Protein backbone atom coordinates (compact mmCIF):
# COMPACT_ATOMS: atom_id res chain seq x y z
CA UNK A 1 0.00 0.00 0.00
CA UNK A 2 1.32 3.43 -0.93
CA UNK A 3 2.09 5.71 1.98
CA UNK A 4 -0.34 8.57 2.34
CA UNK A 5 0.85 11.63 4.29
CA UNK A 6 -0.91 12.23 7.60
CA UNK A 7 -3.86 14.59 7.18
CA UNK A 8 -3.86 17.12 10.02
CA UNK A 9 -7.20 18.59 10.96
CA UNK A 10 -5.49 21.80 12.02
CA UNK A 11 -4.76 22.32 8.33
CA UNK A 12 -7.84 20.73 6.82
CA UNK A 13 -9.83 22.93 4.47
CA UNK A 14 -13.17 21.90 5.90
CA UNK A 15 -15.05 22.93 8.97
CA UNK A 16 -17.53 20.74 10.75
CA UNK A 17 -20.88 22.36 11.48
CA UNK A 18 -23.01 21.88 14.53
CA UNK A 19 -26.33 22.46 12.77
CA UNK A 20 -27.94 20.85 9.77
CA UNK A 21 -28.06 23.03 6.66
CA UNK A 22 -31.46 24.72 6.51
CA UNK A 23 -32.42 23.24 3.13
CA UNK A 24 -31.40 19.67 3.95
CA UNK A 25 -34.14 17.04 3.84
CA UNK A 26 -32.23 13.78 3.89
CA UNK A 27 -29.66 12.31 6.25
CA UNK A 28 -26.76 12.05 3.80
CA UNK A 29 -27.19 15.68 2.80
CA UNK A 30 -27.17 16.83 6.41
CA UNK A 31 -24.24 14.69 7.46
CA UNK A 32 -22.00 15.22 4.41
CA UNK A 33 -22.37 18.98 4.79
CA UNK A 34 -21.99 18.99 8.57
CA UNK A 35 -18.94 16.73 8.52
CA UNK A 36 -17.28 18.99 5.94
CA UNK A 37 -17.30 16.58 2.99
CA UNK A 38 -19.21 18.69 0.48
CA UNK A 39 -20.44 22.23 0.02
CA UNK A 40 -23.30 23.44 -2.12
CA UNK A 41 -22.20 25.74 -4.94
CA UNK A 42 -25.60 26.15 -6.62
CA UNK A 43 -28.82 24.15 -6.71
CA UNK A 44 -27.83 20.56 -7.46
CA UNK A 45 -24.20 21.57 -8.00
CA UNK A 46 -21.66 20.51 -5.43
CA UNK A 47 -18.02 21.04 -4.46
CA UNK A 48 -16.11 18.17 -2.91
CA UNK A 49 -13.86 19.13 0.01
CA UNK A 50 -10.77 17.08 0.97
CA UNK A 51 -12.49 14.35 3.01
CA UNK A 52 -15.33 14.06 0.51
CA UNK A 53 -12.93 13.91 -2.40
CA UNK A 54 -11.10 11.03 -0.74
CA UNK A 55 -14.31 9.03 -0.37
CA UNK A 56 -15.36 9.86 -3.93
CA UNK A 57 -11.95 8.80 -5.23
CA UNK A 58 -12.15 5.55 -3.29
CA UNK A 59 -15.49 4.72 -4.87
CA UNK A 60 -14.05 5.67 -8.24
CA UNK A 61 -11.04 3.39 -7.70
CA UNK A 62 -13.23 0.40 -6.82
CA UNK A 63 -15.40 0.99 -9.87
CA UNK A 64 -12.32 1.34 -12.07
CA UNK A 65 -10.71 -1.85 -10.75
CA UNK A 66 -13.82 -3.92 -11.39
CA UNK A 67 -14.35 -2.44 -14.85
CA UNK A 68 -10.74 -3.11 -15.75
CA UNK A 69 -11.18 -6.65 -14.46
CA UNK A 70 -13.85 -7.42 -17.10
CA UNK A 71 -11.55 -6.12 -19.80
CA UNK A 72 -13.24 -2.76 -20.22
CA UNK A 73 -10.99 -0.01 -21.56
CA UNK A 74 -11.05 3.39 -19.90
CA UNK A 75 -11.35 6.46 -22.09
CA UNK A 76 -12.37 10.04 -21.46
CA UNK A 77 -14.73 11.71 -23.89
CA UNK A 78 -15.75 15.35 -23.72
CA UNK A 79 -18.64 16.47 -21.54
CA UNK A 80 -19.53 19.24 -23.97
CA UNK A 81 -20.99 17.64 -27.08
CA UNK A 82 -22.16 18.70 -30.52
CA UNK A 83 -25.88 18.64 -31.29
CA UNK A 84 -25.85 16.64 -34.55
CA UNK A 85 -25.51 13.08 -33.22
CA UNK A 86 -28.27 13.78 -30.70
CA UNK A 87 -30.44 15.01 -33.56
CA UNK A 88 -29.73 11.79 -35.43
CA UNK A 89 -31.08 9.70 -32.54
CA UNK A 90 -33.85 12.14 -31.68
CA UNK A 91 -32.59 12.73 -28.18
CA UNK A 92 -31.84 16.45 -28.69
CA UNK A 93 -35.63 16.95 -28.50
CA UNK A 94 -36.72 13.85 -26.61
CA UNK A 95 -34.58 14.51 -23.60
CA UNK A 96 -36.74 17.56 -22.93
CA UNK A 97 -35.95 20.18 -20.32
CA UNK A 98 -33.49 17.88 -18.52
CA UNK A 99 -30.88 18.46 -21.24
CA UNK A 100 -28.46 21.34 -20.72
CA UNK A 101 -28.27 22.97 -24.16
CA UNK A 102 -25.87 25.79 -24.98
CA UNK A 103 -24.52 27.78 -27.89
CA UNK A 104 -21.04 28.83 -28.85
CA UNK A 105 -20.15 32.31 -30.09
CA UNK A 106 -21.10 31.38 -33.64
CA UNK A 107 -24.52 30.18 -32.65
CA UNK A 108 -23.60 26.49 -32.93
CA UNK A 109 -25.67 24.19 -30.70
CA UNK A 110 -24.05 22.05 -28.02
CA UNK A 111 -25.16 20.09 -25.01
CA UNK A 112 -23.65 18.98 -21.76
CA UNK A 113 -23.63 15.20 -21.88
CA UNK A 114 -26.35 13.55 -19.76
CA UNK A 115 -25.14 10.14 -20.98
CA UNK A 116 -22.99 9.33 -24.00
CA UNK A 117 -24.49 6.59 -26.19
CA UNK A 118 -24.26 8.69 -29.36
CA UNK A 119 -20.66 9.75 -28.91
CA UNK A 120 -19.43 6.26 -28.06
CA UNK A 121 -21.28 4.85 -31.05
CA UNK A 122 -19.51 7.38 -33.29
CA UNK A 123 -16.16 6.62 -31.68
CA UNK A 124 -16.54 2.92 -32.43
CA UNK A 125 -17.79 3.73 -35.92
CA UNK A 126 -14.57 5.65 -36.45
CA UNK A 127 -12.26 3.05 -34.88
CA UNK A 128 -13.75 -0.36 -35.65
CA UNK A 129 -14.10 -1.66 -39.16
CA UNK A 130 -14.31 -5.42 -38.84
CA UNK A 131 -15.90 -8.04 -36.59
CA UNK A 132 -12.33 -8.69 -35.43
CA UNK A 133 -12.33 -5.30 -33.70
CA UNK A 134 -15.28 -6.44 -31.57
CA UNK A 135 -16.50 -7.11 -28.98
CA UNK A 136 -15.30 -4.10 -27.07
CA UNK A 137 -16.32 -2.48 -23.79
CA UNK A 138 -15.40 1.17 -23.27
CA UNK A 139 -15.95 3.20 -20.13
CA UNK A 140 -15.33 6.56 -18.60
CA UNK A 141 -15.73 8.14 -15.20
CA UNK A 142 -16.91 11.64 -15.84
CA UNK A 143 -19.24 14.39 -14.74
CA UNK A 144 -22.69 14.21 -16.26
CA UNK A 145 -25.18 17.03 -16.59
CA UNK A 146 -28.93 16.85 -16.21
CA UNK A 147 -31.13 19.80 -15.42
CA UNK A 148 -33.15 17.80 -12.92
CA UNK A 149 -36.63 19.16 -12.24
CA UNK A 150 -36.21 18.80 -8.53
CA UNK A 151 -32.59 18.75 -7.52
CA UNK A 152 -32.89 17.83 -3.89
CA UNK A 153 -31.44 15.45 -1.42
CA UNK A 154 -27.92 16.84 -1.77
CA UNK A 155 -25.59 14.77 -3.91
CA UNK A 156 -28.17 12.01 -4.30
CA UNK A 157 -29.60 14.00 -7.19
CA UNK A 158 -27.16 16.51 -8.61
CA UNK A 159 -27.50 18.53 -11.77
CA UNK A 160 -23.80 17.82 -12.18
CA UNK A 161 -22.80 14.38 -10.92
CA UNK A 162 -20.09 11.80 -11.39
CA UNK A 163 -21.04 8.69 -13.34
CA UNK A 164 -19.21 5.67 -14.59
CA UNK A 165 -20.74 4.99 -17.96
CA UNK A 166 -19.75 2.10 -20.15
CA UNK A 167 -20.84 0.86 -23.53
CA UNK A 168 -20.48 -2.56 -25.09
CA UNK A 169 -20.38 -3.26 -28.80
CA UNK A 170 -21.00 -6.72 -30.23
CA UNK A 171 -21.83 -8.18 -33.59
CA UNK A 172 -24.30 -10.72 -32.24
CA UNK A 173 -27.11 -10.84 -29.72
CA UNK A 174 -25.33 -13.56 -27.74
CA UNK A 175 -22.32 -11.27 -27.52
CA UNK A 176 -24.48 -8.49 -26.10
CA UNK A 177 -25.93 -10.92 -23.57
CA UNK A 178 -22.36 -11.81 -22.55
CA UNK A 179 -21.27 -8.17 -22.21
CA UNK A 180 -24.40 -7.52 -20.17
CA UNK A 181 -23.68 -10.48 -17.91
CA UNK A 182 -20.09 -9.28 -17.42
CA UNK A 183 -21.38 -5.91 -16.29
CA UNK A 184 -23.96 -7.46 -14.02
CA UNK A 185 -21.25 -9.46 -12.26
CA UNK A 186 -18.87 -6.48 -12.11
CA UNK A 187 -21.61 -4.38 -10.54
CA UNK A 188 -22.30 -7.05 -7.95
CA UNK A 189 -18.62 -6.96 -7.01
CA UNK A 190 -18.50 -3.17 -6.97
CA UNK A 191 -21.50 -2.77 -4.69
CA UNK A 192 -20.36 -5.59 -2.41
CA UNK A 193 -16.94 -3.96 -2.05
CA UNK A 194 -18.57 -0.62 -1.38
CA UNK A 195 -20.48 -2.27 1.42
CA UNK A 196 -23.83 -1.28 -0.04
CA UNK A 197 -26.97 -3.28 0.58
CA UNK A 198 -28.69 -3.54 -2.81
CA UNK A 199 -31.19 -5.49 -4.93
CA UNK A 200 -31.13 -6.15 -8.62
CA UNK A 201 -34.52 -5.11 -9.96
CA UNK A 202 -36.28 -5.44 -13.29
CA UNK A 203 -36.58 -1.96 -14.75
CA UNK A 204 -37.99 -0.06 -17.68
CA UNK A 205 -35.53 1.25 -20.22
CA UNK A 206 -36.88 4.81 -20.06
CA UNK A 207 -35.31 7.54 -22.17
CA UNK A 208 -32.52 5.15 -23.07
CA UNK A 209 -34.67 2.85 -25.22
CA UNK A 210 -33.78 -0.76 -25.85
CA UNK A 211 -35.07 -3.93 -24.33
CA UNK A 212 -33.68 -5.65 -21.26
CA UNK A 213 -32.72 -3.49 -18.37
CA UNK A 214 -32.06 -3.95 -14.67
CA UNK A 215 -31.45 -1.51 -11.88
CA UNK A 216 -29.30 -1.84 -8.81
CA UNK A 217 -31.34 -0.35 -6.01
CA UNK A 218 -30.01 0.41 -2.55
CA UNK A 219 -32.82 0.28 0.02
CA UNK A 220 -32.96 3.57 1.92
CA UNK A 221 -35.69 5.84 3.19
CA UNK A 222 -34.27 8.76 1.23
CA UNK A 223 -34.56 6.83 -2.03
CA UNK A 224 -36.77 8.18 -4.79
CA UNK A 225 -37.51 4.80 -6.32
CA UNK A 226 -39.96 2.24 -5.03
CA UNK A 227 -39.39 -1.41 -5.64
CA UNK A 228 -41.50 -4.48 -5.16
CA UNK A 229 -39.58 -7.24 -3.46
CA UNK A 230 -40.69 -10.84 -3.08
CA UNK A 231 -39.95 -12.19 0.40
CA UNK A 232 -40.08 -15.74 -0.96
CA UNK A 233 -38.20 -15.83 -4.27
CA UNK A 234 -35.68 -13.71 -6.20
CA UNK A 235 -38.27 -11.49 -7.89
CA UNK A 236 -37.66 -7.74 -7.48
CA UNK A 237 -38.87 -4.91 -9.71
CA UNK A 238 -38.89 -1.15 -9.68
CA UNK A 239 -42.35 0.33 -9.44
CA UNK A 240 -41.04 3.83 -10.22
CA UNK A 241 -43.93 6.02 -9.04
CA UNK A 242 -46.62 4.97 -6.66
CA UNK A 243 -48.88 7.94 -7.39
CA UNK A 244 -50.78 6.41 -10.29
CA UNK A 245 -53.37 3.77 -9.96
CA UNK A 246 -55.07 1.94 -12.81
CA UNK A 247 -58.59 0.62 -12.93
CA UNK A 248 -59.90 -2.22 -15.10
CA UNK A 249 -62.73 -1.55 -17.53
CA UNK A 250 -64.90 -3.87 -19.55
CA UNK A 251 -63.92 -4.53 -23.14
CA UNK A 252 -66.71 -3.33 -25.40
CA UNK A 253 -67.47 -3.49 -29.08
CA UNK A 254 -64.01 -2.71 -30.33
CA UNK A 255 -62.24 -5.60 -32.06
CA UNK A 256 -59.86 -7.50 -29.81
CA UNK A 257 -56.19 -7.20 -30.62
CA UNK A 258 -55.92 -10.80 -31.82
CA UNK A 259 -58.73 -10.11 -34.32
CA UNK A 260 -56.79 -7.35 -35.98
CA UNK A 261 -54.68 -8.76 -38.82
CA UNK A 262 -50.94 -8.38 -38.50
CA UNK A 263 -49.51 -6.76 -41.63
CA UNK A 264 -46.81 -8.63 -43.52
CA UNK A 265 -44.36 -5.77 -43.32
CA UNK A 266 -45.48 -4.06 -40.19
CA UNK A 267 -44.87 -0.33 -40.20
CA UNK A 268 -46.86 2.51 -38.75
CA UNK A 269 -48.51 3.03 -42.15
CA UNK A 270 -49.36 -0.59 -42.86
CA UNK A 271 -50.55 -1.05 -39.33
CA UNK A 272 -52.85 1.94 -39.58
CA UNK A 273 -53.96 0.85 -43.06
CA UNK A 274 -54.82 -2.63 -41.82
CA UNK A 275 -57.09 -1.02 -39.28
CA UNK A 276 -58.57 1.35 -41.84
CA UNK A 277 -57.46 4.52 -40.10
CA UNK A 278 -55.03 7.28 -41.03
CA UNK A 279 -51.56 6.90 -39.57
CA UNK A 280 -52.22 9.86 -37.32
CA UNK A 281 -55.47 8.43 -35.99
CA UNK A 282 -56.23 7.38 -32.51
CA UNK A 283 -56.28 3.60 -32.31
CA UNK A 284 -58.19 1.57 -29.83
CA UNK A 285 -57.99 -1.76 -28.15
CA UNK A 286 -54.64 -2.94 -29.33
CA UNK A 287 -51.11 -3.21 -28.23
CA UNK A 288 -48.24 -2.08 -30.35
CA UNK A 289 -44.85 -3.67 -30.10
CA UNK A 290 -41.66 -2.08 -31.39
CA UNK A 291 -38.57 -4.24 -31.57
CA UNK A 292 -40.26 -6.80 -29.40
CA UNK A 293 -41.23 -4.32 -26.70
CA UNK A 294 -44.75 -3.14 -26.04
CA UNK A 295 -44.73 0.58 -26.66
CA UNK A 296 -48.37 1.48 -26.81
CA UNK A 297 -51.76 0.25 -25.82
CA UNK A 298 -55.23 1.33 -26.71
CA UNK A 299 -58.41 0.44 -24.86
CA UNK A 300 -62.11 1.06 -25.29
CA UNK A 301 -63.29 4.53 -24.54
CA UNK A 302 -59.88 6.00 -24.33
CA UNK A 303 -57.74 7.81 -26.86
CA UNK A 304 -54.47 6.10 -26.37
CA UNK A 305 -52.31 5.31 -29.30
CA UNK A 306 -51.31 8.49 -31.03
CA UNK A 307 -49.45 6.95 -33.94
CA UNK A 308 -47.70 10.21 -34.75
CA UNK A 309 -46.17 10.21 -31.34
CA UNK A 310 -45.32 6.55 -31.49
CA UNK A 311 -43.67 7.06 -34.84
CA UNK A 312 -41.84 10.22 -33.80
CA UNK A 313 -40.57 8.42 -30.78
CA UNK A 314 -39.61 5.07 -32.15
CA UNK A 315 -39.06 5.50 -35.92
CA UNK A 316 -37.77 3.80 -37.92
CA UNK A 317 -38.40 0.62 -35.95
CA UNK A 318 -40.87 -2.01 -37.09
CA UNK A 319 -44.22 -2.18 -35.39
CA UNK A 320 -46.29 -5.25 -34.73
CA UNK A 321 -49.53 -6.00 -33.02
CA UNK A 322 -49.69 -8.32 -30.09
CA UNK A 323 -52.50 -9.64 -27.99
CA UNK A 324 -53.48 -8.90 -24.47
CA UNK A 325 -52.01 -12.16 -23.31
CA UNK A 326 -48.69 -10.39 -23.33
CA UNK A 327 -49.85 -8.44 -20.34
CA UNK A 328 -49.48 -11.44 -18.14
CA UNK A 329 -45.86 -12.07 -19.01
CA UNK A 330 -44.52 -8.54 -18.48
CA UNK A 331 -42.99 -7.15 -15.31
CA UNK A 332 -45.44 -5.16 -13.25
CA UNK A 333 -45.04 -1.80 -14.82
CA UNK A 334 -46.85 0.58 -17.03
CA UNK A 335 -45.08 3.43 -18.69
CA UNK A 336 -46.93 6.54 -19.74
CA UNK A 337 -46.26 9.70 -21.65
CA UNK A 338 -47.30 12.85 -19.88
CA UNK A 339 -48.70 15.53 -22.15
CA UNK A 340 -50.30 18.86 -21.38
CA UNK A 341 -53.55 17.06 -20.47
CA UNK A 342 -51.89 14.74 -18.05
CA UNK A 343 -50.96 11.15 -18.68
CA UNK A 344 -51.61 10.76 -22.39
CA UNK A 345 -50.09 7.63 -23.66
CA UNK A 346 -48.93 4.42 -22.16
CA UNK A 347 -45.86 3.04 -23.79
CA UNK A 348 -45.21 -0.01 -21.74
CA UNK A 349 -47.60 -2.08 -19.81
CA UNK A 350 -47.57 -5.09 -17.64
CA UNK A 351 -49.24 -6.27 -14.56
CA UNK A 352 -49.23 -9.76 -13.10
CA UNK A 353 -52.88 -9.30 -12.21
CA UNK A 354 -54.08 -8.58 -15.70
CA UNK A 355 -55.73 -11.67 -17.04
CA UNK A 356 -55.69 -12.38 -20.79
CA UNK A 357 -58.58 -10.63 -22.48
CA UNK A 358 -58.96 -8.01 -19.80
CA UNK A 359 -58.95 -4.43 -20.96
CA UNK A 360 -57.45 -1.76 -18.83
CA UNK A 361 -57.80 1.96 -18.82
CA UNK A 362 -54.30 3.16 -19.18
CA UNK A 363 -54.65 6.85 -19.83
CA UNK A 364 -55.42 9.66 -17.51
CA UNK A 365 -56.37 12.54 -19.71
CA UNK A 366 -59.51 13.06 -17.71
CA UNK A 367 -58.31 14.32 -14.40
CA UNK A 368 -59.53 12.23 -11.52
CA UNK A 369 -61.00 9.55 -13.77
CA UNK A 370 -58.21 7.09 -14.06
CA UNK A 371 -55.61 8.25 -11.60
CA UNK A 372 -55.63 9.17 -8.00
CA UNK A 373 -53.81 12.03 -6.31
CA UNK A 374 -52.03 13.19 -9.43
CA UNK A 375 -51.33 16.85 -9.98
CA UNK A 376 -49.63 18.08 -13.14
CA UNK A 377 -46.55 20.12 -12.36
CA UNK A 378 -46.28 18.68 -8.90
CA UNK A 379 -46.13 14.97 -9.62
CA UNK A 380 -44.76 15.12 -13.14
CA UNK A 381 -43.44 17.54 -15.70
CA UNK A 382 -45.31 18.05 -18.94
CA UNK A 383 -43.43 16.21 -21.66
CA UNK A 384 -41.88 13.81 -19.21
CA UNK A 385 -42.06 10.03 -19.27
CA UNK A 386 -43.38 8.62 -16.07
CA UNK A 387 -43.98 5.17 -14.82
CA UNK A 388 -47.39 4.15 -13.71
CA UNK A 389 -47.65 1.79 -10.87
CA UNK A 390 -50.09 -1.03 -10.76
CA UNK A 391 -48.45 -3.05 -8.06
CA UNK A 392 -49.42 -2.55 -4.47
CA UNK A 393 -48.11 -3.88 -1.22
CA UNK A 394 -49.31 -7.45 -0.81
CA UNK A 395 -50.02 -8.04 -4.50
CA UNK A 396 -49.05 -11.53 -5.61
CA UNK A 397 -45.50 -12.01 -6.85
CA UNK A 398 -45.67 -12.81 -10.59
CA UNK A 399 -43.18 -15.62 -10.08
CA UNK A 400 -44.41 -17.41 -6.97
CA UNK A 401 -47.58 -15.68 -5.82
CA UNK A 402 -46.27 -14.59 -2.42
CA UNK A 403 -47.38 -11.14 -1.28
CA UNK A 404 -44.97 -8.47 -2.48
CA UNK A 405 -43.32 -5.99 -0.15
CA UNK A 406 -42.79 -2.41 -1.32
CA UNK A 407 -39.73 -0.44 -0.23
CA UNK A 408 -37.94 2.82 -0.99
CA UNK A 409 -34.52 2.66 -2.61
CA UNK A 410 -31.80 4.69 -4.28
CA UNK A 411 -30.91 3.77 -7.88
CA UNK A 412 -27.14 3.29 -7.78
CA UNK A 413 -26.65 1.51 -11.07
CA UNK A 414 -28.51 0.67 -14.23
CA UNK A 415 -27.65 -1.78 -17.01
CA UNK A 416 -29.31 -1.84 -20.43
CA UNK A 417 -29.32 -4.11 -23.43
CA UNK A 418 -29.89 -1.36 -25.93
CA UNK A 419 -29.78 -3.47 -29.04
CA UNK A 420 -29.55 -1.50 -32.28
CA UNK A 421 -31.41 1.69 -31.42
CA UNK A 422 -28.31 3.86 -31.54
CA UNK A 423 -26.32 1.87 -34.09
CA UNK A 424 -29.33 2.04 -36.47
CA UNK A 425 -29.68 5.78 -36.02
CA UNK A 426 -25.95 6.37 -36.51
CA UNK A 427 -25.42 3.48 -38.93
CA UNK A 428 -22.69 1.62 -37.13
CA UNK A 429 -21.70 -1.45 -39.15
CA UNK A 430 -18.57 -3.56 -39.22
CA UNK A 431 -17.56 -6.10 -41.82
CA UNK A 432 -18.78 -9.53 -40.78
CA UNK A 433 -17.05 -12.89 -41.16
CA UNK A 434 -18.72 -13.36 -44.53
CA UNK A 435 -17.46 -10.00 -45.79
CA UNK A 436 -20.89 -8.40 -45.49
CA UNK A 437 -21.63 -5.45 -43.20
CA UNK A 438 -23.15 -6.32 -39.83
CA UNK A 439 -25.15 -3.87 -37.74
CA UNK A 440 -23.54 -3.66 -34.31
CA UNK A 441 -25.57 -4.29 -31.15
CA UNK A 442 -24.98 -2.28 -28.04
CA UNK A 443 -25.34 -2.15 -24.29
CA UNK A 444 -25.00 0.77 -21.93
CA UNK A 445 -24.28 0.64 -18.23
CA UNK A 446 -24.13 3.33 -15.55
CA UNK A 447 -22.97 3.60 -11.95
CA UNK A 448 -23.77 6.73 -10.01
CA UNK A 449 -20.35 7.27 -8.47
CA UNK A 450 -21.17 10.44 -6.54
CA UNK A 451 -24.63 9.11 -5.72
CA UNK A 452 -23.03 5.94 -4.30
CA UNK A 453 -21.22 8.12 -1.74
CA UNK A 454 -24.54 9.54 -0.58
CA UNK A 455 -26.22 6.11 -0.69
CA UNK A 456 -23.45 4.71 1.49
CA UNK A 457 -23.81 7.62 3.89
CA UNK A 458 -27.55 6.90 4.06
CA UNK A 459 -27.15 3.21 4.72
CA UNK A 460 -24.21 3.29 7.11
CA UNK A 461 -24.79 6.41 9.24
CA UNK A 462 -26.04 6.17 12.81
CA UNK A 463 -27.34 8.77 15.23
CA UNK A 464 -23.81 10.07 15.87
CA UNK A 465 -22.88 10.68 12.25
CA UNK A 466 -21.25 9.08 9.24
CA UNK A 467 -19.81 5.62 9.59
CA UNK A 468 -17.84 4.50 6.55
CA UNK A 469 -16.85 0.99 5.60
CA UNK A 470 -13.04 0.66 5.58
CA UNK A 471 -12.49 0.60 1.83
CA UNK A 472 -14.21 3.91 1.12
CA UNK A 473 -13.45 5.76 4.36
CA UNK A 474 -11.40 8.95 4.01
CA UNK A 475 -8.86 7.42 6.45
CA UNK A 476 -8.27 4.15 8.27
CA UNK A 477 -7.69 5.78 11.64
CA UNK A 478 -8.76 9.05 13.18
CA UNK A 479 -6.20 9.94 15.85
CA UNK A 480 -7.52 12.38 18.44
CA UNK A 481 -5.21 14.49 20.56
CA UNK A 482 -7.42 14.94 23.62
CA UNK A 483 -5.45 17.22 25.89
CA UNK A 484 -2.55 19.60 25.75
CA UNK A 485 0.94 19.61 24.20
CA UNK A 486 1.82 16.16 25.52
CA UNK A 487 -1.21 14.51 23.91
CA UNK A 488 -0.73 16.39 20.65
CA UNK A 489 2.90 15.35 20.49
CA UNK A 490 2.01 11.71 21.12
CA UNK A 491 -0.87 11.82 18.62
CA UNK A 492 1.37 13.22 15.90
CA UNK A 493 4.13 10.73 16.67
CA UNK A 494 1.74 7.76 16.46
CA UNK A 495 0.22 9.21 13.29
CA UNK A 496 3.62 9.39 11.58
CA UNK A 497 4.43 5.81 12.58
CA UNK A 498 1.11 4.55 11.27
CA UNK A 499 1.49 6.48 8.02
CA UNK A 500 4.95 4.99 7.50
CA UNK A 501 3.35 1.56 7.80
CA UNK A 502 0.87 2.45 5.07
CA UNK A 503 -2.10 3.35 7.28
CA UNK A 504 -4.19 6.33 6.16
CA UNK A 505 -4.37 8.71 9.12
CA UNK A 506 -6.48 11.72 9.94
CA UNK A 507 -5.23 13.39 13.13
CA UNK A 508 -7.14 15.94 15.15
CA UNK A 509 -4.29 18.17 16.30
CA UNK A 510 -6.38 21.32 16.52
CA UNK A 511 -5.30 23.62 19.33
CA UNK A 512 -7.97 25.28 21.45
CA UNK A 513 -10.63 22.71 20.61
CA UNK A 514 -11.99 20.77 23.58
CA UNK A 515 -11.69 16.96 23.74
CA UNK A 516 -15.50 16.80 23.81
CA UNK A 517 -15.81 18.62 20.51
CA UNK A 518 -13.07 16.49 19.01
CA UNK A 519 -14.83 13.27 20.07
CA UNK A 520 -18.11 14.49 18.62
CA UNK A 521 -16.39 15.47 15.39
CA UNK A 522 -14.62 12.13 15.11
CA UNK A 523 -17.97 10.38 15.34
CA UNK A 524 -19.54 12.76 12.84
CA UNK A 525 -16.69 12.24 10.34
CA UNK A 526 -17.01 8.48 10.63
CA UNK A 527 -13.52 7.01 10.15
CA UNK A 528 -13.77 3.33 11.21
CA UNK A 529 -11.14 3.39 13.99
CA UNK A 530 -10.65 6.21 16.48
CA UNK A 531 -7.44 6.34 18.50
CA UNK A 532 -7.42 8.73 21.44
CA UNK A 533 -4.31 10.11 23.10
CA UNK A 534 -5.85 11.39 26.32
CA UNK A 535 -5.64 11.05 30.09
CA UNK A 536 -3.04 8.29 30.18
CA UNK A 537 -0.81 9.66 27.42
CA UNK A 538 2.01 10.24 29.88
CA UNK A 539 2.09 6.47 30.61
CA UNK A 540 2.16 5.68 26.90
CA UNK A 541 -1.42 4.37 27.03
CA UNK A 542 -4.04 5.25 24.41
CA UNK A 543 -7.64 4.26 23.76
CA UNK A 544 -8.77 2.54 20.58
CA UNK A 545 -12.43 2.84 19.71
CA UNK A 546 -14.42 1.11 17.02
CA UNK A 547 -16.62 3.77 15.41
CA UNK A 548 -19.45 1.37 14.59
CA UNK A 549 -19.74 -0.71 17.74
CA UNK A 550 -18.43 1.94 20.10
CA UNK A 551 -16.25 -0.71 21.76
CA UNK A 552 -13.17 0.77 23.40
CA UNK A 553 -9.97 -0.68 24.65
CA UNK A 554 -6.95 0.75 26.44
CA UNK A 555 -3.69 -0.25 24.80
CA UNK A 556 -0.07 0.73 24.97
CA UNK A 557 1.11 2.82 22.05
CA UNK A 558 3.03 -0.18 20.69
CA UNK A 559 0.00 -2.45 20.98
CA UNK A 560 -2.19 0.11 19.25
CA UNK A 561 0.24 0.52 16.37
CA UNK A 562 0.58 -3.24 16.03
CA UNK A 563 -3.20 -3.57 16.00
CA UNK A 564 -3.66 -0.99 13.27
CA UNK A 565 -0.87 -2.00 10.91
P1 LIG B 1 -32.96 8.56 -11.67
O1 LIG B 1 -34.07 7.57 -11.90
O2 LIG B 1 -32.52 8.61 -10.25
O3 LIG B 1 -33.27 9.92 -12.23
P2 LIG B 1 -31.78 7.68 -14.06
O4 LIG B 1 -32.54 6.42 -14.24
O5 LIG B 1 -32.24 8.89 -14.77
O6 LIG B 1 -31.70 8.02 -12.48
P3 LIG B 1 -29.57 6.62 -15.54
O7 LIG B 1 -29.81 7.35 -16.80
O8 LIG B 1 -29.96 5.20 -15.45
O9 LIG B 1 -30.24 7.47 -14.34
O10 LIG B 1 -28.03 6.85 -15.14
C1 LIG B 1 -27.18 5.87 -14.55
C2 LIG B 1 -26.91 6.14 -13.08
O11 LIG B 1 -26.49 7.49 -12.84
C3 LIG B 1 -28.14 5.98 -12.22
O12 LIG B 1 -28.36 4.62 -11.92
C4 LIG B 1 -27.77 6.79 -10.98
O13 LIG B 1 -27.01 6.01 -10.09
C5 LIG B 1 -26.91 7.90 -11.54
N1 LIG B 1 -27.65 9.16 -11.64
C6 LIG B 1 -28.62 9.48 -12.52
N2 LIG B 1 -29.07 10.73 -12.32
C7 LIG B 1 -28.35 11.23 -11.28
C8 LIG B 1 -28.32 12.48 -10.62
N3 LIG B 1 -29.12 13.48 -10.98
N4 LIG B 1 -27.44 12.65 -9.59
C9 LIG B 1 -26.62 11.65 -9.22
N5 LIG B 1 -26.59 10.45 -9.82
C10 LIG B 1 -27.44 10.24 -10.84
MG1 LIG C 1 -33.23 10.56 -14.17
MG1 LIG D 1 -34.23 5.76 -12.93
MG1 LIG E 1 -31.80 4.56 -14.68
Image: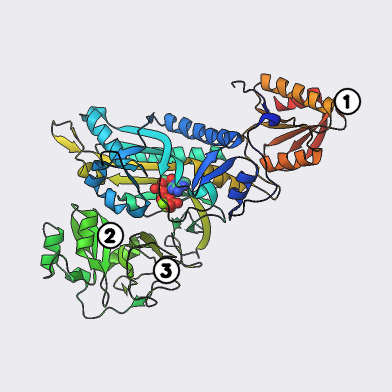
**Which residue in the structure is indicated by mark 1?**
538
Specify whether 15 is left or right of 327: right
Q: Position of residue 497 (x, y in %)?
A: 72, 20
Q: Is residue 28 above or below residue 373?
A: above
Between the residue at mark 3 and the residue at mark 2, the CA separation in whole angstroms equals 19 Å
Helix, strand or loop at label 2? It is: strand
**Which residue in the structure is indicated by mark 2?**
294
Helix, strand or loop at label 1? It is: helix
The residue sitting at 57% across, 33% down in the picture is 54
| Residue density around tag 1, few if under 14, some if 14–19, many if 20 or more, within 10 Å | few
Q: The N terminus is located in which quarter?
A: top right
Q: Is residue 422 above or below residue 559?
A: below
Query: Which mark, residue 244?
Result: 3
Between the residue at mark 1 and the residue at mark 2, the CA separation in whole angstroms equals 74 Å
Q: The C terminus is located in which quarter?
A: top right
Of label 3 and label 1, which has the lower sequence position? Answer: 3
Specify whether 534 is left or right of 85: right
Q: Is residue 431 above or below residue 465?
A: above
From the viewer's side, name the closer residue of 426 and 10.
Answer: 10
Between the residue at mark 3 and the residue at mark 1, the CA separation in whole angstroms equals 66 Å
Mark 1 vs mark 2: in front? 1
Of label 3 and label 2, which has the lower sequence position? Answer: 3
Amino acid sequence: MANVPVQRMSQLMAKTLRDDPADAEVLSHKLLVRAGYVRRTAAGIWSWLPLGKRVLSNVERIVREEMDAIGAQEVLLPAILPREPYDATGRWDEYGPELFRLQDRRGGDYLLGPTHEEIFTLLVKDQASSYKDLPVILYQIQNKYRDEARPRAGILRGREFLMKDSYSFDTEDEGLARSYALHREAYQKIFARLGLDYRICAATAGAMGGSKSEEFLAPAEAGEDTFADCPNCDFAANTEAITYELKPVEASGVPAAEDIPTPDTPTIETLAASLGVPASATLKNLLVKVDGEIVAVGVPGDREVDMDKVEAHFAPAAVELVTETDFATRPDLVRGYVGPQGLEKVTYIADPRVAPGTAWITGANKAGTHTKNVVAGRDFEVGEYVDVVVVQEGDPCPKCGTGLVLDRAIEIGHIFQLGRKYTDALKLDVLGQNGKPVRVTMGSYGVGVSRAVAALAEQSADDKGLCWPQEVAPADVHVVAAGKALQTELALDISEKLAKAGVRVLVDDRAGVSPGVKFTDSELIGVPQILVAGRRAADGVVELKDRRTGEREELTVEEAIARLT
